[in-house]
Amino acid sequence: MLSQIEGSRAVAETVGHCRPQVICAYPISPQTHIVEALSALVKSGRLTACEFVNVESEFAAMSVAIGASAAGARAYTATASQGLLYMAEALYNASGLGLPIVMTVANRAIGAPINIWNDHSDAMSQRDSGWIQLYAEDNQAAADLHVLAFRLAEELSTPVMVCMDGFVLTHAVEAVDVPSQAAVDRFLPAFQPRQVLDPDAPLTIGAMVGPEAFTEVRYLAHTNQLRALARLPELADQFAATFHRDLDALVSPYRCDDASTVVVALGSVLGTLKDTVDGMRTAGMPIGVLGLTAFRPFPAAAIKTAIGAAKRIVVLERAFAAGAGGIVSADLAPVLPADRELYTVVAGLGGRPVTRDSLRETLAAAFAGRLAPLTFLDLDERLLRAAEEVPS
Amino acid sequence: MFEVRIHGRGGQGVVTAAELLAAAAFAEGRSAQAFPSFGSERTGAPVVAFCRIAERPIRLREPILRPDAVIVQDATLLRQTDVLAGLADGGLVLVNSTRAEAELGLSDHGGRVIVVPASRLAREYLGRPLPNAALLGGFAALCGLISLESVTAAIRARFPGPVAEANTAAAAAAYDLVRAHRKERARA
């Protein structure tokens, strides 16, 4: 049933319906509403058989999730920005140990300078942590992807991050069909851990692995992630059959079929992009949008298929690597046939709005052959000059 | 698509106003999107929230730059921020004040400005100067996009019994005031 609900609230209700057994959290904007709502669900008795653990830091939150998951509990946490960075060491342990933790990242910029607003710098900084990363386009996708995430994580014994744009989605109130308890129960079976830490049947997990086998461990982690590329569309089909709505689990092409230009992007900017592209289509420009839901694993084959014969690919990046350029672009470049042009547009850093006007102008420049290989959307030259004039 | 920008001060319930407006539109079977523009969230600091209402699903995520209507919860903001920035031609302006349009310097805005004493009504009905419900009741009368019944339903869904009833009474009073005000103007 559709309800008009805040994104954070929709995610919290959905996570609750996934019957987590341990939730540990440390508040940080813009993630806080999610764990606040979950704590209220536990306290009110609506979410039973679940322990809500208040911890003293994000490092502790992930460590508690690791312990809980290793002991056989379905574990969940959420964070953002500096909180995700503070977890970094434990993130690699969670994936290395094959623990199917699900975590929401309410995407936010990383300081300094301190900035609470949305971009993708936090999740992108952990792209190589061994976690699967799924990005939500809207709050319906954010809710639905959590159900999918628990299922995928537990099937593959690997942790999954569901990334949703901080404030833009977490604090937006819109219509969401929160997956019902009955439907989630049909889709998501009880957690059957592969191995359990149990004092009555002692075993060791995470023992030291030396040079003789470390490469093989990493190789298996890679092939395990690649299994998700095949599994995600299958699970999306099952999801559609259970919940009676589509869920794009790998990529979501929009008007790509006869497009000469395709814009690739992740997250909530896709909606604004689609509106922009509709206008440009009306003006006679053959342009499409390709949303990536999965960033890890990287859906190279699905991207190649969706791009088809488009000769110009513009990647809209909500984060970037100083001294190098686009992060998604770098992954995409080797996928593209040699005769394609690749452009990177860095947009919406630290919460700067990404508007249709600016997108239209920049994408029209691409059609006119005037777009530089690396562009920063709405770069304020006046501010740059002012920065140069500051005496050092 | 109809786009509304709401200006207020931290603590006045700017975000709640946008959410209630979206809930009212949703109750009428429309698509609606409410979202805040967060800055320094200090009590008393200028805050902006947005609400889009459409017949089709809303995909757009940019802030509302060219609103069809502006709601101003605190008239002192008129001196501080350009609350009319980007307002569409013939756009609607609803201001919470006990003073007349001319006193507020809004008289040459083409008759689309309406002032409603929302804080005074709130004091009267709620015992507290929380202008949201009255402003939304006034807004329903001003633009006709959403009905007073939908505003009432949104208020009842959000607040417990007695608080909801006091708020719906304030909304209805503001609705009547704005209706009367508009009729008077039409006659003049």
Image: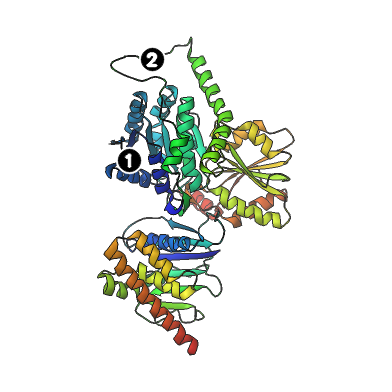
Identify whether B112 is placed above or below A252. below
The C terminus of chain A is located in which quarter?
top left
Is the same chain shared between marks 1 and 2?
A: yes
- Residue identified by numbered label 1: A47
Q: Is residue A204 left or right of residue A1?
A: left
**Residue in the foreground of this view, choosing between B167 and A382:** B167
Q: Residue furthest bottom?
A: B188
Percent position of residue A202, x then y:
31, 14
- Residue identified by numbered label 2: A207
Is residue B57 visible to the viewer in this orientation of the structure? yes
Identify the subunit bearing mark 1: A
Percent position of residue A379, x then y:
56, 51
Element type at mark 1: loop
Q: Is residue A1 left or right of residue A74?
A: right
Q: Which amino acid does label 1 sit on?
A: Leu
Q: Which badge, 1 or 2, is on the more N-terminal residue?
A: 1
